[in-house]
Image (cartoon, helix red, strand yellow):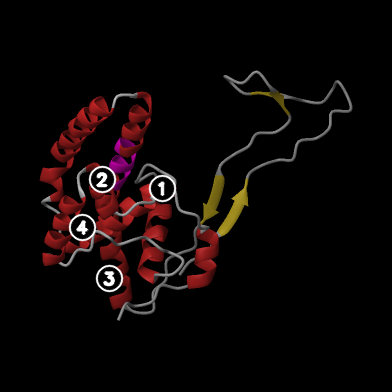
Amino acid sequence: MIFVATGYAQVPEQVLDSVTEKLIIIEGDSIFKASIDLDEVYIFGKLEFASYKEKLRYYVLRRKTIKVYPYAKMASERLVELNDTLQMIKSKRKKKKYTRKVQKFIEGEFSEELKKLTRTEGQILVKLIYRQTGNTAFSLVKELRSGWRAFWYNTTAKMFDINIKEEFHPDEVHEDYLIEDILQRAFASSKLQRQKSVLDYDYATLTNKWGKPKSEE
């Protein structure tokens, strides 16, 4: 399906042996440089599928992934904001008060929209929350609320065949790799705003491992 070339657009810095050497001045940086470090670049090959069924499954997964990714990104940002603020609050009482305030804000931000998600969209969201935070949705609920509340959330989710303890492992699960592929292509085309995963894996290595997408049996 994919040929990925990983390019590091970085020119090695050269030792200046002459006053005629050209230097680069980057706005906001007081250091003179002989090169500019650029972000990693992926070159994507054309999508290829072994069957129409396989193609349909990929595009359905793409539509659902692109739909729910912004929620996972927002959840990650809110969690970072919460943790950063809590570190500055010394009083336990004030920490609890602030945490409850954030809980209500997040619930108000997410509740109505999340109710509109399908079962598969909800499960993809759970995976993406793990991708963005390194924590399962279950552990986040448990941390912000209580163990019993997290258990209740998990039991309710199971009624709709959603496991909020689900993790994201694109190096082990083929569907997770496809989700990562969808995200990388969406980032590159500016359909989604890039937010780096906290997990440790390399997309190019994953592509070499999985090769063409396979039908899920």
Give the label, 2 or 3, closer to the camera.
2
* Amino acid residing under circle 3: Leu
How much space separates mark 1 and mark 3, taking CA atoms? 21 Å
Residue 90: image location, x then y, percent: 34, 24
Say whether residue 76 is magenta.
Answer: yes
The residue that appears at 76% across and 36% down in the rendered structure is: 13
Q: Position of residue 77 (x, y in %)?
A: 33, 37
Q: Is residue 201 left or right of residue 110?
A: right
Range drawn in magenta: 71-78
Q: How crowded is mark 3: few (under 14 residues within 10 Å), some or many (20 or more)?
A: few
Around disc 2, counting alpha carbons within 10 Å, would you say few (fewer than 14), some (14 to 19), or many (20 or more)? some
Q: Is 157 situated above or below 80?
A: below
Q: Which amino acid does label 4 sit on?
A: Gly
User: Which quadrant, please, contains the C terminus?
Assistant: bottom left
Which numbered tag is attached to residue 71? 2
User: Distance between the Cα atoms at labels 4 and 3?
Assistant: 20 Å
